[in-house]
Image: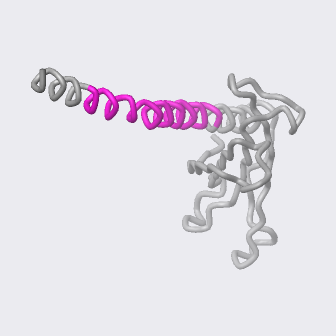
Amino acid sequence: MVEVVLALSIVALGLLTIMGLFPQALNSAKSAADDSLTSLVAQDTIAERRIEIATNGAPIAVIPNGDIGRLSSTSVQRWFTVSGQETNVAGLGEFHCVLTVFPVTTVPSLPNLEFVQVQVMWPYYNTTVFPPNTNTYYTEISKY
């Protein structure tokens, strides 16, 4: 009888330990899904910028008056829902995306090159700690 109680207590302890890992696993899965969605949002935002440059004639970021000391930047804000759909209403967006474009100053012979930073923050509706999660992506876009 003592052996059965001891065996059951060992099994119960093992099951409790495994059950304690479930919340951590669920948080890790949610975090991985959010990271995947933020990368898709960033890719969509960068692709939109490339399309603007290629088809709409949007200008490449330039150094104002040739003065490298005064860099100007252009920022565009976008909001996305949990499913990754873009929305025009900031209050409905789970993900807040800020696209910032800078001129490339390290290679003056390439005036058709710009540095792009995409910052994705989520959950955007949470105002207690703002932003609670942030991923930042960088790339360069050229006009050719």
In terms of image quadrants, where is residue 120? Answer: top right
The colour style of the image is one colour
Can you say whether 104 is above or below 82 in the image? below
Tally of marks: 0
Quadrant in the picture for the N terminus: top left
Q: Viewer-proximal residue, 56 or 23?
A: 23
Q: Is residue 104 magenta?
A: no
Say left or right for 92 vs 22: right
Highlighted range, magenta: 12-41
Q: Residue furthest front?
A: 1
Q: Does 9 sit left or right of 50 as displayed? A: left
x%, y% of residue 46? 65, 38
The secondary structure that most of the magenta stretch takes on is helix
Q: Is residue 27 left or right of residue 58?
A: left
Q: Position of residue 59 (x, y in %)?
A: 79, 48
Q: Nearer the viewer, residue 37 or 130?
A: 130
Foreground of the two, 130 or 70: 130
Residue for point 68% across, 22% down: 83
